[in-house]
Amino acid sequence: GIRRLNKLLITNARLVNEGETRDADVLIEGERISRIEASITPSDDIEVIDAAGRLLMPGMIDDQVHFREPGLTNKGDLATESAAAVAGGITSFMDMPNVNPQTTTRQALADKYALAEHRCTANYGFYLGATNRNIEEIKALGVGEACGIKVFMGASTGDMLVDDSAALERIFEYAPVMVVTHCEHSPTIWDNEAKARAEYGDAVPMSEHPAIRSAAACLKSSSMAVEMARRFDALLHVLHLTTAVEMALFSKAHRSEKRITAEVCVHHLWFDESRYEDLGTRIKCNPAIKAASDRAALVKAVNEGRIDVIATDHAPHTSSEKKQSYFKAPAGLPLVQHALLVLFDLADRGEISRELIVERACHAPADLFGVQERGYVREGWYADLVIVDPDRPFRVEKSNLLCKCHWSPFEDHEFSSTIDTTIVNGEVVYRDGELTRNIAGQRLEFDRAR
Ligand code: DOR
């Protein structure tokens, strides 16, 4: 359903945007923001949402999700997971290529965009996946066609390891857009797995995961990525960092001055290895959740600017798949519905500020990927907005989960904030705990060449 009126006014908001928080009213006309002022007087032809002092911010732009379509739709699909995303205040997402068939050709990419049309509640962009042999596809890619080139420099879900060093060099040399990498050195991990098997057989305890998918494996691979990016002057964004030792690879400079940037995911900012005991394979993910000291270093790096972006790596698997033993349980967890709530809890604890949440989860991904006219609350830009109630707790229960896999590592946790309202392209898509069923997502436009 299209909104009855073309104009929507949000009044009495505390606007968190561009490094500051201030009182503001925001007028939306059609799909864009038309005015931002201290006070805007409503008229009869304007629908009003009274934010009543709640926080208003740009919707989160999640630069790393696995929505599982095409081919793995028993775990999730573009419609279900994008709906869960807006319930979490995410208004744009960038989806990974480890689907079936893999998104490793321009044709597969075009097919995926066709599949997404009119089905996504949030705005969407897709990565082209690299392989050991698809350099011609990468070279032919147009800048607006993909958000980036995804390179699994470590093996994970989906059998997409790129481990031929000559192939890797050509990717860094010729990628027309940003290269984004999963960095874990697979031979190191295989070695660690063999040692664990020798000790425990198949009954490897979950607590061994960070020793198997070790900090050394991460560092070896991320160092290699950074070295290659420097050598070929590529644009590199290293995904889901998890360790203190890797932080020295990244500069504190503002993103506008860097060609090598870094991302952390909410689960690595929230959990540490002490939680393997109660959550087990539910929090099995690649790279692994590591020590409390690593988590603290990641929080520090977010504050310092060594880490530029906060994302989710939303990676749903069915609960029966996740209930298997260590080696069999797939890695990944569903996160989009609760990512911003995690960040606002961290803000309540004083670990990050609200302005920094907006900086790392909204502004930075927009800038780094050249997302056109989104990621900031600005006159003339798209109205992708979220109202957060910082004074109303939200308890995660099976009954309020929206992801297709229908489980969450946060079940029974009470967050201190609630996502009140989410607006995508000027359409209210989520309000008061309910999806409105407006399918307002559009294809993202990218404009950042290497
Ligand atoms: O935990 C993970 N799950 N890490 C990845 O790299 C892939 C993802 C998935 O697709 O399941």
Image: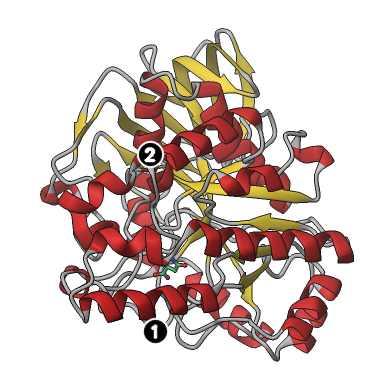
Mark closer to the observer (2, 1): 2
Can residue 139 be seen here? yes
Q: Is mark 1 within 8 Å of ligand 1?
A: no
Instruction: Please determine whether, in this image, residue 5 is positioned above or below residue 391.
Output: below
Closest to the observer: 88 or 113?
88
Instruction: Please determine whether, in this image, residue 344 is positioned above or below residue 382.
Output: above
Can residue 372 be seen here? no
Q: Residues within 10 Å of mark 2 (few under 14, many from 20)?
A: some
Residue ID for mark 1: 71
The mark that comes first in sequence, 2 or 1, is 1
Residue ID for mark 2: 292
The quarter of the displayed image where residue 393 is located: top left
As helix, strand or loop, the secondary structure at mark 1 comes to: loop
As helix, strand or loop, the secondary structure at mark 2 comes to: helix
The quarter of the displayed image where residue 172 is located: bottom right
Q: Residue at x 50, y 41 (%)?
A: 60
Q: Residue at x 25, y 79 (%)?
A: 328
